[in-house]
Amino acid sequence: MNDKEPPHSQRNIVLVGFMGSGKSTIARALHQRLGYPLVEMDQVLEERAGKSIPRIFAEDGEEAFRDRESALLREQVESKAPGRIVSTGGGVVGRAENRELLRRLGYVVWLKVTPEMVLERTARTRHRPLLNTEDPEERIRTLMEQREPLYEEVAHLTLETGGLSSDEVATGILECARYHFTHSA
Ligand code: S3P
């Protein structure tokens, strides 16, 4: 075990992936199956700010959002509570500091999806400020190209979720996480 691996008291499962990759759905499935508390980072940031993510971006700017996101991630790493499911925002991997924190936080699972799947899943919502552009498809492709190497860098496990039910994805994650925690303890 190298020093970037979580200590064995930190049996957290951390979901990363692009907007629309299904992190929240899978996080809920894992929460139901394991009974571990669920930390939806975007939701916590909205509650703390008292406003929605589009409003945080519009009124405070993306950098302010990223600073709060990094601070919350650090809090999660420093928390002694064992066994949480942590669902992150799609851009959390942008900062090197965050990538290091993610690895320390727990078993990191990248839910990998195609740009086509993202476009389809995000088309009907305006909740994602980064996709409120003239050409969301182009934005998705550009951001995905920048971020894929970063998701890959932090992930203990990469799951291509196309064609799988959330139950199947959750089962795969649980089996791999159990193996990981048993063998790194
Ligand atoms: C973002 C993804 C969003 C949210 C914010 C920024 C991103 O979360 O954190 O809109 O940079 O990809 P989801 O991945 O849950 O949509």
Image (tube, rainbow, N blue to C red):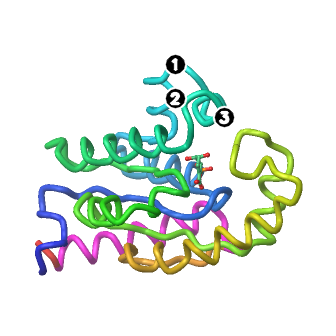
Was residue 178 drawn as part of the magenta stretch in this picture?
yes
The residue type indicated by label 3 comes to: Pro
Considering the whole magenta stretch, tell me its main secondary structure: helix
What's drawn in magenta, residue-wise? Answer: 162-183
Residue occupying the point 82% across, 59% down: 136
Label 1, label 3: how far apart the Cα atoms are: 12 Å
Label 3 close to label 2 by CB (< 8 Å): no
**Which image quarter holds the C terminus?**
bottom left
| Res 46 label | 2
Looking at the image, residue 31 lies above or below residue 172: above
Residue occupying the point 39% across, 79% down: 153
Where is residue 139 shown, x and y percent of the image?
A: 75, 64
Q: Is ligand 1 closer than 8 angstroms to the Cβ of mark 3?
A: yes
Q: Which residue is mark 1?
A: 50
Label 3, label 2: how far apart the Cα atoms are: 10 Å
Q: Sort mark 1 into few (<14), some (14-19) or many (20+) by Cα contacts within 10 Å.
A: few
Q: Sort mark 2 into few (<14), some (14-19) or many (20+) by Cα contacts within 10 Å.
A: some
Label 1, label 2: how far apart the Cα atoms are: 6 Å
Image quarter of residue 108: bottom left
Q: Nearer the viewer, residue 80 or 177?
A: 80
Q: Which residue is mark 3?
A: 54
Where is residue 39 shown, x and y percent of the image?
A: 40, 41
Image quarter of residue 175: bottom left
Looking at the image, residue 114 lies above or below residue 50: below
